[in-house]
Amino acid sequence: MNQNLSEYQSILLKVFKHFADFCSNNGIQYYAAYGTMIGAIRHKGFIPWDDDMDVFMKRKDYDRFITLRKTVDKPYKIATYLDGYSPYPYAKYYTTEGTIWEFAHFPFVYGPWLDIFPLDECNGSKDNAALEAYHYATWKYRKAIAYASWKEIGYDLFCGKILRAAIKTIKKTRYAPFRNRYIRQIKIAEDLFRAGQGNSLVDYSGAIVNEVFSKSWFDSTLQVPFEDTVISIPNGYHQYLSYLYGDYMQLPPEGERKIHIPYFIDLKHSLTIEEIQNRYKSQLIDKQSLPLRTILDELRHRAKGWKSSRIKE
């Protein structure tokens, strides 16, 4: 166990324990994923510089998890695009004790969180048509919930930032009124994922890269130490980690040890966006852009979506 957890990691560990109990009490199976699985195997806890936790759920468990989101005890919550605010195509399990505003573009605040990614069946490769439709609908949904008040747009015009004001106005008038339509389109695309069958599992919420996992790697779970508790990992963890990362026991170069830098973070208080803007306006960093990989991926799906994969309701 790491005796020198950061304040953030200590809070996140508490969130994870509540999440694990919630899953156990409701008969939901999860698996540590991505860097969290590496941390469990290589460090028996957090990767020292890591500041988030990722888990997988097979689609059946994930759907049940989502349907139970209103039953979570305070101060914990489950965020999903279905509620029309979260900009993420996957679920988040988080605490409301503390405030994180990750991207200024989206009016969605939460506390330290876990990312929950659904795994769907496929026959050796992703269903590209469903994938394009999904990301195209997600792209439109993101535009619909992008944050810009008329006051902010007016200020941009006053400062001579005509193009910025025009883009914000387009989002506010062209996409925002149709948010519920885009939510329905994402749900339709997810139904295509649910219909998939085969001997492989895939995380469709990721990039277009065709990363698929053998279903046999997730036949059962192992309980391994994670800080002062345990975490579930798939029985084929070695095959999974080797497939994605190669020699996963080797530490990456220091320059590749990335962390999240949110637009605003306060681990002591639960604040609304209005409170953040009123109290800390002078301290807010420049507006955070989405990760370049996410932007490029969305643009690729947007172009292909226009050509061949637009969802008809």
Image (cartoon, rainbow, N blue to C red):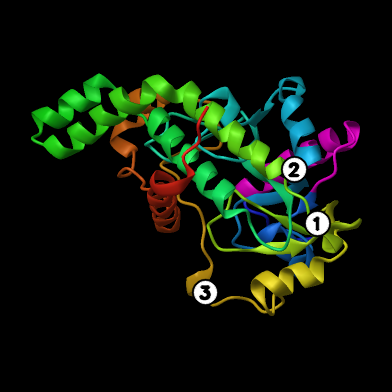
What separation in Å lies between label 1 and label 3 (alpha carbons)?
23 Å
Mark-to-mark CA distance, 1 and 2: 10 Å
Earlier-in-chain disc, 3 versus 2 = 2
Q: Residue 86's mark?
A: none
Type of amino acid under label 2: Phe
Q: Based on the displayed image, in which of its 4 quarters is residue 159 positioned?
A: top left
Q: Are marks 3 and 2 in contact (CB under 8 Å)?
A: no
Question: Residue 66: x and y, percent?
Answer: 72, 30
Query: Would you say residue 307 is visible in this rendering?
Result: yes
Quadrant (top left/top right/bottom left/bottom right) for the N terminus: bottom right
Give the residue drawn at x 40%, y 48%.
Answer: 307
Residue 291, magenta (yes or no): no
Point out the tag, 1 or 2, that comes first from the N-terminus: 2
Local secondary structure at mark 2: helix
Mark 2 Cα-neighbour bin, 10 Å: few <14, some 14–19, many ≥20: many
Find numbered disc 3 in the image and state the secondary structure of the residue it sits on. helix
Disc 1, disc 3: CB below 8 Å? no
- Tell me the crowding category of disc 3: few under 14, some 14 to 19, or many 20 or more residues within 10 angstroms, Cα based: few
- The magenta stretch is 8-30
From this view, report whether residue 114 is shown above or below residue 51.
Answer: above
Q: Which residue is mark 3?
A: 254
State the mark number for residue 226. 1
Residue, disc 2: 16
Q: In the visual, does 258 lie left or right of 70?
A: left
- Please give left or right for residue 88 compared with residue 64 in the image: left
Residue 180 lies, in percent from the top left, at 49, 22
Is residue 111 at all visible to an observer of this figure? no
